[in-house]
Image (cartoon, rainbow, N blue to C red):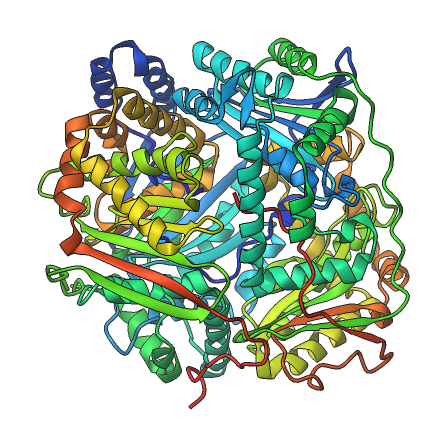
Amino acid sequence: MLKTLFAAPLALLLLLLAPWAQAAPKIESWTTGNGLRVYYVSAPNLPMVDLRLMFDAGSARDGAQQGLASLTNSMLDTGAGGLGEDQIAEKFDDVGAVFSSGSSMDMSWTGLRTITLEKEEKAALDLWLTLLAKPDFPAEPFARIQKLMLVGLQAEKQDPEALASKAFYKAVYGDHPYGQPQNGTEDSLNALKLDDVKAFYQHYYVAKNGLLAIVGAVDRKQAEALAEQVAASLPTGAAAPPIPEVKPLTESKVVKIPYPSAQAHILVGQVGDKRGDPDYFTLYMGNQTLGGSGFTSRLMKEVRDARGLTYNVYSYFSPSKEMGVFEVGLQTRREKTEEALQVVRDVIGKFQQEGPAAEELEAAKKDVTGGFPLRTASNSQIVEYLGVIGFYNLPLDYLDTFTSKINALSREQIADAFTRRVQPDKLVTVIVGETDPVAATAPPATPGATADAAPPPAAAQPPAR
Amino acid sequence: MRRILPFAGQNRNTKTILAVAALFAGFFAPFAQAIERLDVKSPVHEYKLDNGLKILVKQDNRAPIAVVELWYKVGSSYEHDGLTGVSHVVEHMMFKGTQKHPTGEFSRIIAENGAEDNAFTSDDYTAYYQIIAADRLEVAFELESDRVRNLTLPPAEFKKELEVVKEERRWRTEDKPPALTREQFSAVAFLNSPYKNPVIGWPSDLNAMQVEDLRAWYERWYAPNNATLVVVGDVEPDKVYELAKQYYGPLKPTPDIAPPKPQVEVEQKGLRTLVVKAPAELPYLLMGYKTPALINAKEKWEPYALEVLAGIMDGGNSSRFARELVRGQEIAADASAWYSGYGRMSDLFSLSGTPSKGITVETLKAALLTQVEKLKTEQVSAAELERVKAGVIAGEIYQRDSQQGQAEQLGSLESVGLGYQLADEYVGNILAVTPEQVQAVAKKYLVEDHLTIAELEPQPIDPNKSKFEPHFER
């Protein structure tokens, strides 16, 4: 049984997506004949290769059919070219290959990790290509996955953190696609039909809407051949149109979800930034000091170290295709809810007005630039990076210029960006676990609308598989 | 789905592997040769300082970084009643300063060097790690060596940190129904083995904990002769040794560290069942059979056969649970099996699951038990067995993508007393497992008299009912 405890919560996956510069792997990029963009890094030391195929086909494309992107993605290995689920699973396992798939707000993807021995690699690749080119979308697995997603919704209802996250996205985004639950609602899932899945796949899983990342023990020539094979398994299609812009919040909101938990699970935040945002670097670096650097951040020092109010407190910007969230999260014993919230609001407010101290910025620069090589040490990490760079159309020299961009930032630029981009009087506050209706109030400065959300709305988490 | 084979080992003795692979004719030979080529490049270098500190170094030049881990032989299974959780609280306090580096300095210096750091506590060990640019290795050595002996344990910091740990307990266990079930399950499955206790400690033990308890625990177990330093990365082994001599060499050893009392679990004399009621939506089932561990198994092949048995049940999407319970009969929303045989003491072969929609927990339990019975009465097919083995070998290669994973394997094997060399034999021993052996261990160990079954019985999630939480209020 896994019983391992950590001094601090493990860094969020998001933090892995922080950029790097020194010793950056050499990225090569090209486009196949039918429009599939390819990003490749040679990693010859281990006899393995990772392929990851991404599409602009995340939950932001669900429309009214919430959960459709996720369900479609879960169908990929359930039947293709006449092979059933069991046969597909066997064929991958026979050669030690790892098939994976997943979806988020912006994208859906499928991955293949295989040994680069000729016979094993060919068997794994042929099967993966069959899944892409000839999906059968059989009815039985569809019904089962639909049921599993409903069980996933139930699991969320016993998870106060998931409830908080779902309510947070709803409150920040309202009717924007980013505010819709990625894993659907009971009603939306029950309404989905197999034909919806087929249509979604045919529309979005196409070369011009996709991106292939290749990292491993294949040379450029082999990578080109691989990419052509993948591209040939996809129709040309067209890139998906832009999703709507996100409107910033106009007032503060407090959402309280009563729940019989030992802790109050608290999220505070608002609309953040997007990939390629002119303020991306300043917000990223400022957030390092605010709540993005673990033990050394202001939030950790004030809420955990100085007061013992929480095990974990963090903040991050989650830049997406359109505006992602700026989120602060923590959990504290219920009777300390108000005290902890006040500390968090004070820390955000002070930082928003003043930005980092000169020595804080200096420390953050050393942390971020000195840590670059750590974040591209493994093939898995490099694949993730290729995804971000490719999917969000960041320049190929993005990494090579990153250190100089970070080092050039001034305290004033960061303070200015936070003053413009973070509005302490327009924050969303979600509290799950609070029972006393007067215990948690809106920020004293500008009391805003209060929305009591019970029963809880739907979630922002992918379904359990 | 969880990864089934915890040890996709590295650094095996290539002779063993090839010899065994030869038994499997052409099927596994190419895999084994691929691993062999890696092994030639990265053996483990072992050193020992005069004060007893063991040092293991493995080169991985793929990136200019190093993973540095210091492993202590102490964890929750070393604790006695009334003091549970103390190893973990000490681990938290290790970030609260020494004379030379007062509270906050450790993390500040680590961050200034762009390094990541953290620590973890388990039943059988406590480990501290830094991931750092390889040319800054000395920074990690200087800081880590200083806190082996010189922790100040300020009472005011302790008081606050204990609250942090209590919050951690609420977050990890109290508010997560399956975690709560697992905690109570272990306490029922084991009568006198310390594996009955949660790593984070029982609430009243945390409430009663004093800084003096921590000091005594720290002084008893934190010594160079009770630790292993593991470095994996872009480093020269001999230079690492020199650096270790410089920083760790002056530390005084503690003479005659008494090992923990054996606390060998008494034989279970019949089925044990328990029900855990908590506000929840989904039932959850957890079952565990008593099994020997690698360290004490009389028949050395048995743990490997148990490992393969777990792989047959739940080793990938083609395994029996995925095929028959999740797909097929659609009884389980998820179902898992795993063998815990790599600890200091005997542990369990476990099964767990969540029923699918409209399926009762009774039906799921019956289905899991039917799966167990089938493995006792029928031999697994050659194709199934080969598939599990292919996964193990591929896992060997994939595992090398993570420097941290490699370091953790060396450190944990060494700390529980199995010795890091065990990884050498792992693949060979798995490849040698036969269908007869899989059946034999199923028959011998998956028996009802040695079984504990816990069931989470969901209670209504009543938002107005405050959680019964007397634990931390006196």
Pick the front one: B361 or A38: B361
x, y percentage for residue B292? 16, 48
Q: Give the quarter of the figure containing the C terminus of chain B.
A: bottom left
Q: Nearer the viewer, residue B311 or B299?
A: B311
- Asked whether B309 or B419 is in front, the reply is B309
As drawn, A461 above or below B275:
above
Residue B150 visible to an observer of this rendering: no
Location of residue A212 by image quarter: top right
Q: Check the image and report above or below for A2 versus B29.
A: below
| Left or right side of B185 for B139 | right
Q: Quadrant of residue B42?
A: top left
Going 68% across and 70% down the picture, which residue do you hit?
A: A454
Q: How many marks?
A: 0
Name the quadrant of the N terminus of chain B. Answer: top left
Given the current orientation, which residue lies at the most extreme bottom position? B474
Of residues A93 and A153, which is closer to you in this image?
A153
Q: Position of residue B150 (x, y in %)?
A: 39, 69
Q: Is residue B410 visible?
A: yes
State the residue at coordinates (23%, 13%): B22
Q: Residue at x 46, y 77 (%)?
A: B162
Q: Residue at x 20, y 40 (%)?
A: B303
The vertical placement of A393 against A322, above or below, is above
Which percent across, then down, holds residue B412? 32, 48
Q: Give left or right: position of A330 versus A399.
A: left
Residue B442 x/y as whole percent:
18, 40
